[in-house]
Image (tube, helix red, strand yellow):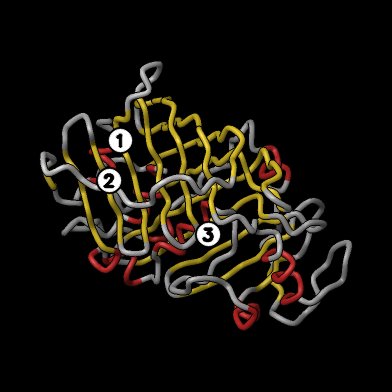
Amino acid sequence: MLAILALVMNGCASKKAVVDAQNATTPTATSTKGSDAKTAGNAATTTTKPGSKPAGSEVVSAAAYVKKVMDTQVYAKNVVSDLSFNIQAGSKDISVPGSLHMRRDEVIRLQLFVPLLGTEVGRIEFTPDGVLVIDRMHKEYIEATYTQLDFLKKNGLNFYTLQALFWNQLMVPGEKSVSDKDLTKFELGTAQGASQNVKLQQGNMTYNWTTQPQTGQIVMANVNYANASNGASSLLWMYGGFTVLGTKKFPGHHEIQFSTSASKRLKNVKVTLDLDSPKDKADWDTKTAVSSKYKKVEATDILGRLLRF
């Protein structure tokens, strides 16, 4: 989760490092629980233009296969679950209990608690309007709209992009959802064994999804950003531990690895979310009210503040 924040807040600072984008390295998949992502981790990079026929157990058009991947997404309106949260960043390796509350097209909320006591120490919330981070230990909060963050604005990244990553779905940056008219925007890699790559290129961003050919289930998402003046960043999001949610399957294990050459401080962050039986529950409030006793602070060092939780 903090890795996602590090990626999306990459454009917050007033000054950015100028690096050669070609020097950025992509994190290596190391999950022990996300076996689905590891099995499919050797997807080919050769791409197939839309409308052509990829190799695999079924000969289908590229658009038809992308449609198959789209059809794996859950119908649930809500995803609610307790979870175990772990972050590894620099010399820090922190594990705490937490909870995840998501309502489609409305909010993604991650709460972190004090072990045993269960007291909330921090809250990270994404809505279509912006980002809210609450540090209850220091009585501070950060609130910013997506248009205030250059990195997001320039690359069409918004709430719906993040929602797709959390919900294990395809995305088209700048769009609320993927529609049938978007199918031809995707390309396919040559299917090899247990994996089939789906690719989308837009501006400085490259999106790759590794899927299981038989089912179309997404087991890995790889988002890469490269810019000569802003540096390069890579986000690897691996999914595993799929459980039934309604009539579809939802990943109970999320491993998120973030690497950047543009950061002056942390260059590599790894976050693991292990959900405990996600459910479609609607009996919760999507609105978070910030106490008037809390101090609003600037969004120039969000990741550093989160590590203070």
Identity of the amino acid at label 3?
A: Ala
In percent of the image, x 45 and y 64: which residue is there? 160
* Cβ atoms at labels 2 and 1 below 8 Å apart: yes
Indicate which disc residue 41 carries: none
Q: Which residue matches tag 2?
A: 133
Does 197 appear above or below 299? Answer: below
Give the camera-side residue of 71 and 61.
Answer: 71
Determine the residue located farthest toward the top in the rendered image. Answer: 116
Front residue (pair 66, 282): 282
- In this image, 263 relative to 299: left or right? right
Q: Residue at x 42, y 51 (%)?
A: 108
Earlier in the chain: of badge 3 and badge 1, it is: 1
Residue under pointer 1: 122
Residue 164's tag is 3
Q: Secondary structure at mark 1?
A: strand
- Picture coordinates of residue 307, whole percent (x, y): 29, 33
Q: CA distance from mark 2 to mark 1?
A: 7 Å
What kind of residue is marked 2? Answer: Val
